[in-house]
Image (tube, coloured by chain):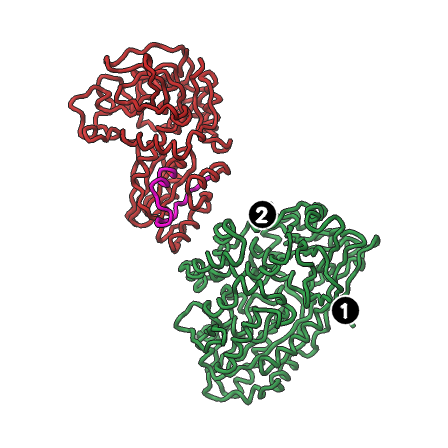
Chain colours: A red, B green
Amino acid sequence: MSRLVFSRKPARFAAARLAGTLMPGRGASVGPLSLEPDETLPLPSPEWLRLRPRLAGICGSDLATVDGTASAYFDPLVSYPFTPGHEVVADVVGTDRRVVVVPVLSCITRGISPVCHACEHGHIHLCERVAFGHIEPGLQTGFCESTGGGWSHEMLAHPSQLVDVPADLSDEAAVMVEPMACAVHAAQRYTGKETVIIGAGTLGLLTLAAITATRDRERTGPVVVTARYPDQKRLAKELGADVVCSTDELPRWVRSATGSLVFGDQLTCGAPHVIDCVGSSESLQQSLQVVAPGGEVQVVGMPGNVHLELTSLWHRETAIRGCYAYRRPDFDTALELVRRFDLGRLVSATYSLKDYTDAIGHAAHAGRRGAVKIAFDMRSN
Amino acid sequence: MPRPGFVHEVDRSSPPVLFWRGENFSLEKLPVGRSRVIYPPEPLPAIKDIDGAIRHALLNPHDQDPLPALLFPGMKLTIAFDDVSLPLPKMRRPDIRQRVIEAVLDLVAAAGVDDVHIIAALGLHRRMHEYELRHALGDRVYDAFHPRGMLYQHDAEDPDNLTIIGTTDHGEVLEINKRAADSDLVIYVNINSVSMDGGWKSITTGLASYRCLSHHHTGETLQNTKSLMGHREHSALHKSIWRLGKVLRDHGPKLFQIESTLNTDMFPEQFSFINKREWEWTAKDRATYLGVTKGLNLLPVKARRKMFHDIQSPHQMTSVQAGETSAVHEITLAKVFEQQLVPVEGQTDILTLGIPFVSPYNPDSVMNPVLVMCMGLGYLFNMYRNKPLVREGGVIIMTHPTYRDFNPVHHPSYIDFFEQVLTDTTDPVVMGQKWEKQYAEDEWYRHLYRTGNAYHGVHPFYAWYWGAHGQQHAGKVIIVGGDAPTVRRLGFTPASTMDDAFEIASDVVGRTPTISHLHVPSLLVADVQ
């Protein structure tokens, strides 16, 4: 029984940052992530439960953490050492329940009473007491010393964090529920007008699926998705994109679809809604290039430190709006959509914890290697 | 005395045959005993006194009064001329258009006519750059007329400067340039490189609106144009144009058509091997070929392209005739065929074509993939009279690098066409119904066409339609040496070598197909019996 632990080791962190910048995913082999024996965590309060993770996904924010490229913004929001892993399907110890974890740590999970205004209204992702309460700081399960994380054989969860998995849903499908819930949350701002999704990794594809689920294709504007690799393009088409193109081609498609003129590199019109599922300087700059005046760029991919030319934002009164996590009901929708679109097929490969460097290397180059979601498999010890 | 064209049956002693490959060449060995190479006639001698011949044509027109008799003080005169799409390559200065227009202007001045406008008859082609206008018309004409706004380019999207002349009995609306329509006389200055051009096509396309052109520039019409370069009665396109011409003749302004023909002396001395039959190559020709092809391989494609587009052709005028459009055009056609016609016996299973660096739609620009299709299936395939050189269901093999490269200034809508339309369909009829309107009415393309140097937004469709008959006729189209994904996007099959292409073709035409190679340059029309 073991777990992966991310420790506060500045020298190793620097090495991970260097290696991860040069070669994404290489931070796993030189950085502060290590495989250690499992340790029994104390329950923060009696109502907390012990879980045995079955599958735990590797997401973009995990990769940024392992490679040391995540923003320093998160430093006060995590507690070391922590076990990563927030896309988790697990068994509840002592029961026959198989659950998906809602990793956001809200006032309820932190034992804060009365709960904050946001949590009171179900907006747990906007919790105003984040990093406080009777557990160590942690943005989510998977970044908190007290809770452990999914990249292990044991972790803790508050009952409010658990969503039961129907018996007929595979573990592979279930592990897609958490990222799907993010996508469901993002798709709630879909307007039915011309929409651009930048990036066709896990988040891009799932956001596309969430939009497709709510959309009458005959009566809504085209959904244009940028994808880099052939498998991403194929999946984007399958999941309902009207147009799949490369990032180079995107401005031309948007211009054509919206009847726009062009000045310099800037479209005069554009798509009212651009969903950036990459979060890089380049993707955000392109979002501003193709978004309509008065339109919105929704940042779904975690951005970190970016450099942007914002004059067009000012001039065209466009908005950049973050999109983090979900509310609890989004998981119900996500469960339904994972089943409807058969999204378990997006789990391309699983690894045991001991092969974590290979797993993270695969996840870091998933698109190029024809993969979408890489996960750790703890079903056999 | 120039030798006529002829058909060479390939035997064991036949040397490899020259093929264009865009901005380079290759020599290809064709199978012995079942291949033939159709060589063009040698260039006819040029008229010795060109200016004298022009003046004679103006003073002795066909079925029309001499030009001086049509000119009077106070009249409104418009001179329209063929644009940069021909001749190819551009001719050495002075261009024929300059010589003809200067001769016309001498008579115009003598008659005291001062309301003269000169209009480049672009149709939906791109506006010419200043250097191209100066090349075609000469500095004297350019400097005298352009600064005063009396030399300009037709705008098929300017509603204030278009007017409807009438409608044909097939419901085709003839809408042309308002200045021309309102003139007391329109003089059209044409160059006839190929038999498809000239006649009523000059004004009814060169000075027409999109609405007018859209009647006959369609997938269906071009699929039913079974003889683009040969017999007009087998061309749905030309039948429509001739109907529009009748409307123009009956209800339009008075016309004075000046048509000229060129010989096929297309390349200067340093490329002398191009115009020769391969077995007549001298040691110097072989050395030149080797030097040119090896040297070109060392150059980046942009440098190669510039080198070829900078070529100024020595081709020269073989005839000039003026007067009533139909009468003039019949004489022109006879002269074109005198230069280009080659009798050929029967069809073959395969037609091979070397695709050059230039087509009518990319002078001084990039031969993009859509234009490769247009040049191969639209132009070279159609260089026949009576029947195509290749049998129906046969295979067309073209050689061209078919790079995925576009000139964004000249061909902006071509890029979108390649990305959007060709990923959806390569069927000219389907794309016409589904996509053409969007491109034709796109405000950005319209802006670029009207104010920049871009082909009209709909033009890639027209380029594609041009190959519609060839596309329908061929059982398979193979491009040798092309970028494979780009070739596939066109709906064709890529091959690395000519031998590979023959192997691929064997699926369609068997293992011992008969083969025709159309030897370009220069230009020829195969008169297939």
Mark 2 or mark 1: whose residue is earlier in sequence: 1
Q: Residue at x 46, y 47 (%)?
A: A249
Secondary structure type for disc 2: helix
Q: Is residue A211 magenta?
A: yes
Secondary structure type for disc 1: loop
Q: Residue B488's mark?
A: 2
Q: Is residue B96 above or below residue B383?
A: below
Q: Is residue B489 above or below residue B96?
A: above
* Residue A87 picture location, percent across and down: 37, 25
For residue B506, side relative to residue A251 (left or right) = right
Confirm whether residue B243 shows in the render. Answer: yes
Q: Does mark 1 fall on the same chain as mark 2?
A: yes
Q: Residue at x 46, y 56 (%)?
A: B434
Q: In which quarter of the view is residue B474 placed?
A: bottom right
Please give the range of residues in magenta.
A208-227
The residue where tag 1 is placed is B4
For residue B267, side relative to residue A319 (left or right) = right
Confirm whether residue A67 shows in the render. Answer: no
Q: Is residue A347 above or below residue B149?
A: above
